[in-house]
Image: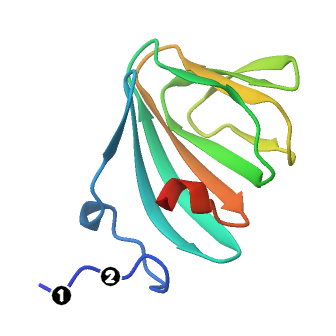
Amino acid sequence: MDAAPDRRTDVFVLDDAVAWEDLGGGVRRKILGYNPTMMMTRVAFDAGAVGAPHRHPHHQCAVVESGVFDVTIDGRTQRLSAGDGYIVPSNALHGVVAIGPGVLLDIFTPMRQDFLD
């Protein structure tokens, strides 16, 4: 088997090559790949887990891979399920609540240096 790819430069993303990071509260994250201009992460939620409202200067878009989430962006809440997505403008207050277990695929631009620190 080949050595683990460098997530900063490799053009292919192999999910099995990346370990989950436990963020607590029933939330886990994988940083799948990144370069200075973008980052892709997968975030898994247990039923009832909360992505607390927060804001950041990065632009973000996400796709619900599985499950059902109540997503709130700048005071607007929408229930989303597998295949649905959302876009978060820079500095918009946003958060999610997992109605059941589920997974989000997040893309950020520029990349989230704070996720690596």
64 over 6 or under it: above or below: above
Q: Which of the 4 image quarters holds residue 46?
A: top left
47 over 95 or under it: above or below: above
Residue labelled with disc 2: 5
94 and 85: which is toward the camera: 94
Give the x, y percent position of residue 25: 40, 21
Q: Residue at x 49, y 79 (%)?
A: 8
100 over 7 or under it: above or below: above
Left or right: residue 70 versus residue 59 is: left
Left or right: residue 14 versus residue 2 is: right
Give the x, y percent position of residue 22: 33, 38
Residue labelled with disc 1: 2
How packed mark 1 is, by other alpha carbons closer than 10 Å (few <14, some 14-19, many 20 or more), is few
Q: Are marks 1 and 2 in contact (CB under 8 Å)?
A: yes
63 and 35: which is toward the camera: 35
Left or right: residue 95 versus residue 67 is: right
Colour scheme of this structure image?
Answer: rainbow
Amino acid type at circle 2 is Pro
Give the x, y percent position of residue 69: 59, 22
Q: Residue at x 71, y 31 (%)?
A: 54
